[in-house]
Amino acid sequence: MQLTLKQIAEHVGGRVIGDPDAQVSGLGSLDNAVEGEIIFLANPKHADKVRSSRATAVIMPAGANCYGKNVIETKNPHLAFAKVLALFHDQTTHFKGVMEGAFVSPEAALGRDVTIYPGVYIAAGVTIGDRVVLHPGVVLYEGASLGDDVTLHANVSIRERCRIGSRVIIHNGTVIGSDGFGYVPEGKKHFKIPQVGIVVIEDDVEIGANSTVDRATLDITRIGRGTKIDNLVQIGHNCTIGEDSVIVSQVGISGSTTIGRNVTIGGQAALAGQLEVGDNIVLAGRAGVTNDMKEPGVFSGLPAIPHRDWLKSSIIFTKLPEMKNTVAKLEKRIAELEKQIASHGQQ
Amino acid sequence: MQLTLKQIAEHVGGRVIGDPDAQVSGLGSLDNAVEGEIIFLANPKHADKVRSSRATAVIMPAGANCYGKNVIETKNPHLAFAKVLALFHDQTTHFKGVMEGAFVSPEAALGRDVTIYPGVYIAAGVTIGDRVVLHPGVVLYEGASLGDDVTLHANVSIRERCRIGSRVIIHNGTVIGSDGFGYVPEGKKHFKIPQVGIVVIEDDVEIGANSTVDRATLDITRIGRGTKIDNLVQIGHNCTIGEDSVIVSQVGISGSTTIGRNVTIGGQAALAGQLEVGDNIVLAGRAGVTNDMKEPGVFSGLPAIPHRDWLKSSIIFTKLPEMKNTVAKLEKRIAELEKQIASHGQQ
Amino acid sequence: MQLTLKQIAEHVGGRVIGDPDAQVSGLGSLDNAVEGEIIFLANPKHADKVRSSRATAVIMPAGANCYGKNVIETKNPHLAFAKVLALFHDQTTHFKGVMEGAFVSPEAALGRDVTIYPGVYIAAGVTIGDRVVLHPGVVLYEGASLGDDVTLHANVSIRERCRIGSRVIIHNGTVIGSDGFGYVPEGKKHFKIPQVGIVVIEDDVEIGANSTVDRATLDITRIGRGTKIDNLVQIGHNCTIGEDSVIVSQVGISGSTTIGRNVTIGGQAALAGQLEVGDNIVLAGRAGVTNDMKEPGVFSGLPAIPHRDWLKSSIIFTKLPEMKNTVAKLEKRIAELEKQIASHGQQ
């Protein structure tokens, strides 16, 4: 695939500086681009890499030094870069139908133009939309449903009756709808609470590899439209995640916690159960939330506090031995003063 | 399935207040129950939801306000709820035998009334009890054994010679018996220590999705009877977990650590290797254990200390900048006092 | 398999004390060895277990008390033990070819003496070296390549075009080459950045179960030769891990971070993105790295500081309530002194 710089600029709503007819055959990285490729500069600190790059053109913000390269100027080079990448790497898969070695229940309903690889298992009562791609080892339990344009990578499980929206992508090994972790003590033993609810994954959600989203005890565990979840994330039963939120790798969210829209949760952060976290909140990596949070802001630490405060406390933490010494010295100086005052008094 | 309130009360050992012949067709949640459903109230703070619920009946502790609803009164509404849920959602699966597309070694021994889905692989020397259900993608390596009434969900692996007891449930993607993480330095390289021990999972254990339990170097990694393990948990080689313990999601337990009975380990907690943790200990979420623990109690923090102490220290942590200011001010006041005393002395 | 003590000693470069013709049939643990087995003593604190063991012989360092047992004396008993274990548990698998129920594209190229179990899926353009073992449920996407002597355990996925070196072992459920977690904000929505790079796993790497290594956005996510990675580890897109490093369970490494050689990263540690971590650095369990690190050393805490300093601060953390009390008392004593001084001045 070859595109002119002009074509690319139009696609991303940018402006060409240099040769609009320059041919571009793909995207390259700042470090490794070769002739014919286009690169992008988001961070001015790497500007000198533009100079030394062999790339044919560069996507950059207005006013940046292009070192004589062909340029597509745009307000948001990062977004433009992503759009050009999508343009060159059109993921349209040619539909292959139900391949030999896939197991499809006669009581399942499949949409048009699907691709079902060998080793897929589709139980009775499953419904699947159009243009769905199921990679090998995908298992759809009874009554699961998938919308249109869903891609499930190898070894993904969708458990009983869970519902997946349209344009959802789930990466390898992720499990949707395993039982929530619920037991009631009965003496020293643990009586299992049947987990008979479901999971609903709304449209345009993407979930990484080897993550787990537990089905509700009753009702629904819900992942809101457009939310993006990374690898190895745990979402407990009866959680609700709002729309357009972002959950980074290895986050753990305990049961029955509700999270708002446009929330960002950094890697390894954790939330206790039965909490409410409002819209637009940012939890830094490894934040630990143990109380409801309403006001937007950036929060860190366990228990989570405003990030700036946490930073200050963290720096002092590293100097606690010093502070302890200071306090000990003050104590001595005070004792000395007290002695002196006492002797003054006696005089 | 329809049951009368009286039948349900008998099943859970409770007492009916209201109409014993009221028909119940299932369980509902406080928020979403419809007519014909029974709900349960554990937390009095949600009592007003009982009033507005359309449920036909409610399971509650003696003395709670039932707002005129039919009631099953019981000491432990949560347990009663779980039992009624189990009653309505009887998980008995109708046995389907070895389905086409499953690979069963002629040298494996299967019990009666098993269900082996397509895409299951059973190696030579495997033994399987009665009424076992193996979902698609389950892989049993050579010599693995399963007791009666075991359910392994899709894509679970049981590695070579590992032994699973009866009534064990393992959710999707979990790996039992992968190699322990053991190497010996040989210069700058790492010489792999063969991991030739096994894992033993005792009766009535349940393990969530995408967890990993490593095989022992020699001997056995053991999960005790009745212990419940959540998703994405790591159990290192040669660990022993006692009976009826509870391990929440994303916990990591390093090699050769021994944990007692009725221990509860909160989410993301971690234990260093070669430790002993006694019975009835509770580790709060993200606790980090680096020393043996004998006395029961609740522990938090890294290193783990009694939870109350940790809470106090954590609160002060958030106020360290304040404390630092206080100390700095004291220092100035002392210097001022010292100056005054000195000038007094000189008078 | 039976070996004489003399044969074993020669294999590990050790010296026999006692009967060189004693027959050994396997390795035993200090606790459970039986007659005919050889044990090893690394930690002198367990020396009394040698006395009570029924083992036929013991591998130990020069000068240790052997309590009359046959001994192989060696500088590094742990390494010798590993080598003897490898000797007794030769993992050579007898090649079984492509078994019925495996799906191999006619456009894939397989080496000699491979073992491809039922339920494996091999896409077009895949190349596989000699003596490769692919367990059931392994999925190799288009264009993936494996070197010689690779073992992929059940349900491992190797995504599009990723390259695995020789003698690599990957345990069950691990995912190589799922999409990196990359989005650009477009209003409140998240525009997916196509992830079109690959993962390269170099020779002699071992990766545990249910870990995830994301493909690069462009270019390569690289795991260096000889590096060992445990279970449930997350490696972000465009990371580079140096040679002979060790990454323990549940570690998370954010995107574009570069890690040197012979680095050790303890369990649950985390590294922010776009960092550089030099050679020979040791991160303790749950360390959190937010800045570049160059100098070797052992580091702990979030943010990570030298381990000794962190230990000191951590101990003081547990005593913060005490320190707070001390400061409050000092404040009172100072106020008292100030009063006294003031009254002195007035006299």
Image (spheres, coloured by chain):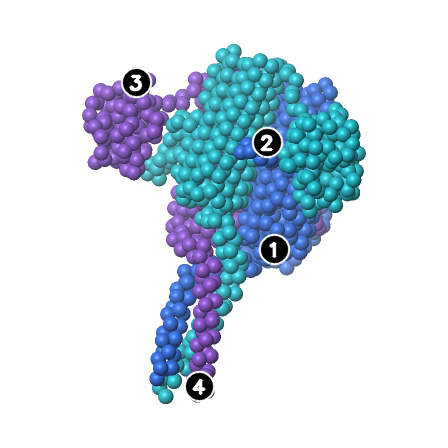
Chain colours: A blue, B cyan, C purple
Rounded to the nearest whole Å, what is the CA distance between mark 1 and mark 4? 52 Å
Instruction: Identify residue for label 3.
Output: C2
Q: Residue at x 42, y 44 (%)?
A: B290
2 vs 1, front mark: 2
Rounded to the nearest whole Å, what is the CA distance between mark 2 and mark 4? 75 Å
Q: Given the image, on which type of amino acid does mark 2 rest?
A: Phe
Instruction: Identify residue for label 2.
Output: A191
Tell me if label 3 and label 4 are in contact, CB under 8 Å.
no
| In the image: residue C293, left or right of residue B58 | left
Viewer-proximal residue among B338 and A296: B338
Q: Residue at x 66, y 33 (%)?
A: B80
Q: Given the image, on which type of amino acid does mark 3 rest?
A: Gln
Specify few, some or many for label 3: CA neighbours under 10 Å numbering under 14, 14-19, or 20 or more.
few
Q: Are marks 2 and 1 on the same chain?
A: yes
Which chain does the residue under circle 1 lie in?
A: A
> Which is nearer the N-term, disc 3 or disc 4?
3
Whole-percent x, y for residue C168 in the image: 45, 30
Q: Given the image, on which type of amino acid does mark 1 rest?
A: Val
1 vs 4, front mark: 4
